[in-house]
Amino acid sequence: MSRLGCVILWISLSLGQALGQAPVSFVRDIAPVLVKQCQGCHGPKKVKGGYRVDTFEHLLKPGKSDAPAIARGKPAESELFLRLTTGDADDLMPQDGDPLPPKQIELVKRWIVEGAKFDGTTETAALAGLLQPVEHPPAPESYPSPVPITALEFGPEGERLFASGYREVTIWNTISGELLGRLGNVAERVYDLAVSAEGRLLAVACGQPGRLGEVRLFDLASGELRSVPVTTADVVFAVAFSNDGNRLAAGSADNKLRLVEVESGKVTHELGSHSDWVNSVAWNADDSRLVTASRDNTAKVFDASTGERIVSYLGHQNYVRAALFHKNGKEIFSIGDDQKMHHWKIEGPKKVNDSSASRSTALAIARIGTELLIAGDDRSVRAFNINIKDESRKWDGHKDAVLSVAVSAATRQAASGAYDGEVVLWNIDEGKIIRRFHATPGGVAGKENPPLPRQGEGRGEG
């Protein structure tokens, strides 16, 4: 920059300060732009040009060009600013959207001129986690077509069933099949649901692929949003309350497992042991251990107090979709894309046996007492007694891939949700259908959805 340019820049800064112009805040002014406009192509999953903007630490690092991304005080030497203002269409950012408005570009310029200061908590934190919780757009009043039921959860009394919707969670009466309520202000896609043991709180794992992941906690008595304890740069796939209700575990597409104190909303542990998506998480009976299932082809057991990894199970050699503890707490059941249910001991780890879980991919698992229920994309639910090796009952009744399954100890009922939006309620002891309905508010049951993504097209993609 020329001496004259420096003088003009100094004068403009001095005038701005004299007129009481507040300094640009990275958290308030810059991070929201990066998350919304840039992170989709420069985040943990998609890294165009070798450059990431999903944390402040990554934002400062150069991409493949080795040009400084941010030269503090020098926007004309900062690759980020140059890419926002270039006249070359091939280099202009963002490439998959409209150019940034002049006011936003000016904010970025001022922020760099002012020293590119960071006013967040830690430079390694996901930018999405630095932002104030967003108010999500409302769900449509009625659905033009059914949405896949990716998550189900019973209330403690067994008479309410919570189901994933589009930008909402729907609540259904299990006796009549009627819609009881709708909880909005959640992200576009809902991936998992958990109700605390006493029935006070609902945790929603949700997100928008490549942009945002959240765990949202709702007070079920009032329906009000209580907190957003987890915010990540990509979707949250799994959430589970500890049995005492004091802690929460969440697994996400940024390959991490997070543990949260429910009362304070504080993340106590952030575990990066997996090298790919964390698809599911479950607690053991005394809340001392956790088991995770991952797209890195492993299931892992962790100490819930220290966060230390106890063991990794490598037996699937394919995506692992879900895992949970045997009632004895010493063994694990896990399922995945190898079409089998693996039964293994934590000590070792050592495989006890494996059983056919589905003719195709096994997608979800639930346990009630000695009964294991497995949902698969062969349109069935399979019931296993954990005390009887290699014996299962196949429950038919769905017309499309079964994506989710939940159980109620209070009523000894199970619920399964399918890609076509249909929910089926089952008598667990007899394996018979009690009721079926489309969990589609105001929609037309029976309308077809697009074809189900096949193996390799993950839940968070698209």
Image: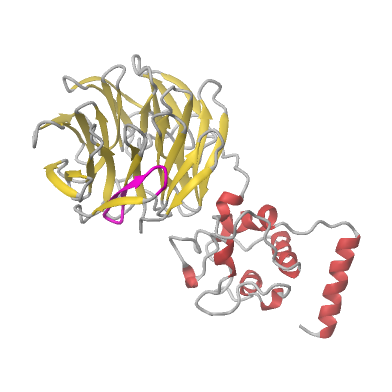
The foreground one among 133 and 419 is 133
The foreground one among 239 and 186 is 239
- Residue at the image point whose x is 57% and y is 39% from the top: 137
Magenta segment? 293-307
In the picture as drawn, the residue positioned furthest to the top comes out as 175
On the image, the x and y values in percent for residue 246 come to: 47, 32
- Residue at the image point whose x is 69% and y is 52% from the top: 28
Residue 264 in which image quadrant: top right
Vertical placement of residue 443 versus 156, above or below: below
User: Is residue 11 one of those drawn in magenta?
Assistant: no
Vertical placement of residue 388 versus 130, above or below: above
User: Is residue 305 one of those drawn in magenta?
Assistant: yes
- Residue at the image point whose x is 30% and y is 56% from the top: 296
Q: Is residue 33 left or right of residue 364?
A: right
Query: In this orientation, does residue 94 appear?
Result: no
Q: Is residue 458 left or right of residue 99?
A: left
Identify the colour scheme used. secondary structure
Q: Is residue 275 left or right of residue 331?
A: right
- Residue at the image point whose x is 63% and y is 69% from the top: 84
Query: In this orientation, does residue 198 appear?
Result: yes
In the picture as drawn, the residue positioned furthest to the bottom comes out as 2
Q: Quadrant of the N terminus?
A: bottom right
Vertical placement of residue 438 versus 5, above or below: above
On the image, the x and y values in percent for residue 327 come to: 24, 31
On the image, the x and y values in percent for residue 45 come to: 43, 60
On the image, the x and y values in percent for residue 334 come to: 23, 43
Residue 324 in which image quadrant: top left
